Amino acid sequence: MSEAIKVSKDLYYIGVSDPDIRVFDIIMKTANGTTYNSYLLKTPDGVMIFDTVKKEFQDDFFSKLESLCSYDEIKYIIMHHLEPDHSGALAELTKRAPDAKIFISPMAQPMLKSIAQSDTMEFETVWTNKELKLGGKTLKFLSTPNLHWPETMSSYLLEDKILFSGDVFGSHYYDARVFDDLVGDFDYAFKYYYDHIMRPFKSDVVKALSLYKTLDIDTICNLHGPIIRNNPNKYIQLYKKWSSTEDRLHGKKIISIFYVTSYKNTKDMAHSIYDGLEADENLIANIYDLTALDEQNMLSILEESTGILIGAPTINGDVPKPVWDLLSCMMLLEKKGKFGGCFGSYGWSGEAVDMMNSRLKALKFRVPLNPKKIKLIPTKEELYECYNFGVEFGEIVNGKMVEMTL
Ligand code: FEO
């Protein structure tokens, strides 16, 4: 158990530490552990709590809370995010402080009852421009959805210039010293966290940053890792840079072909498709043999590409592993507005191409063309069909309207 820590004159950190966790949410490595941050604001008219903690750490959370106030002093509970690492202690908190009113985003409403395990709690939904006043303090709510759940929101404590950013600007990095200017170098963890949690929602990050830009921010009270008070602008600018959709290609769209091949047949298809794409000088086509590409490079290429074409033969009735690796790393990307398509040569049953196509559709790519399948060695005519497949895919990515089947 540790003690509550003062963040500003009236605000206290009552979060908890999870130093031994090594994998978070199945996919994230947490070499330095993590924290579940929560805050308590004391005013002459009562107390506000900002988020709770993961259930297994709630005793520590309640102990800190009780060191600062009694439960009947708690007037409001602000829940910026309902994922269990922040809402795990909410059910117990609503039992102990039954008169406290909960503030959530409208999208959080369907989840709240089951998470708070209460039918009687009072709650209100809030969004940008709504305000809450208590004991001389003003809390302004900010709608920042999809960062990284649909119901996420932020808020800003006007008098103290504090942004409560939810998971935004977090990092999985435990250090008992709590503040960014006191802990070790956590930049790697800040970037890793962005890449895994915020990167798939870049356009929503940009919208949130445009709201944050209107605020004078001294301190960022996030939900994981060090509280940022030394140079908040540094971290805001990093998010801006990483989420930028800067048009370095002056309007030209990129289409990338990824393939694996056993006997060069799928490779020959890939190159004919590439030639078809290259026929349009307003496109930039790339072609990659997946067996020689590591995941970080895949991600950068995928991120920059508006169109993605994947080619593979069928091996033992399945898609070869390098393609599954490519398809699985797409969960870290924003897919909005991207086009996809598939092709491949096959010997017997040829299931791989349809499997890849279904996967792209499930990932919400727009898949305008039927997959291109060729039995064994492509003939000259079939390679010409591949060329035309490339031409047509390029035209669609560049704006030609077509009807798409689901
Ligand atoms: Fe830290 Fe999305 O929960």
Image (spheres, rainbow, N blue to C red):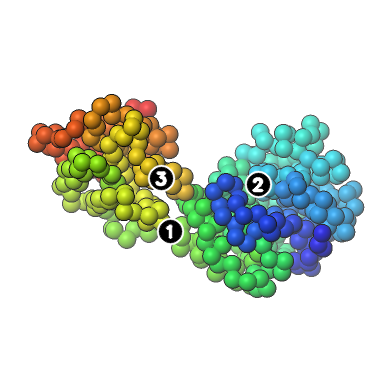
Residue under pointer 3:
325
The amino acid pointed to by label 1 is Ser
Q: Position of residue 87 (x, y in %)?
A: 71, 45
Q: Where is residue 242 in the image (x, y as percent from the top left)?
A: 46, 60
| Callout 3–callout 1 Cβ contact below 8 Å | no
Distance Cα–Cα, label 2 vs label 3: 30 Å
| Badge 1 or badge 2: first in the primary sequence | 2
- Residue 225 visible (yes or no): no
Instruction: Give the SS element for disc 1.
Output: loop
Tell me which corner region of the image, top left, top right, bottom left or bottom right, holds residue 181.
Answer: bottom right
Q: Mark 1 points at which residue?
A: 244
Could you say whether the residue bearing mark 2 is in a helix, strand or loop? loop
Q: How many labels does the image show?
A: 3
Q: Which of marks 3 and 1 is nearer the N terminus?
A: 1
Q: Which of marks 2 and 3 is nearer the N terminus?
A: 2
The type of residue carrying mark 3 is Asp
Residue 110 x %, y %? 66, 33
Q: Residues under labels 1 and 2: Cα distance?
A: 25 Å
Q: Is residue 238 left or right of residue 73?
A: left
* Residue type (three-letter) at the residue carrying disc 2: His
Secondary structure at badge 3 equals helix
Q: Please report the residue visible at 77 percent of the width from the left and 58 percent of the height from the top.
A: 14
For label 2, being within 8 Å of ligand 1 is answered yes
Numbered mark located on residue 81 in the image: 2
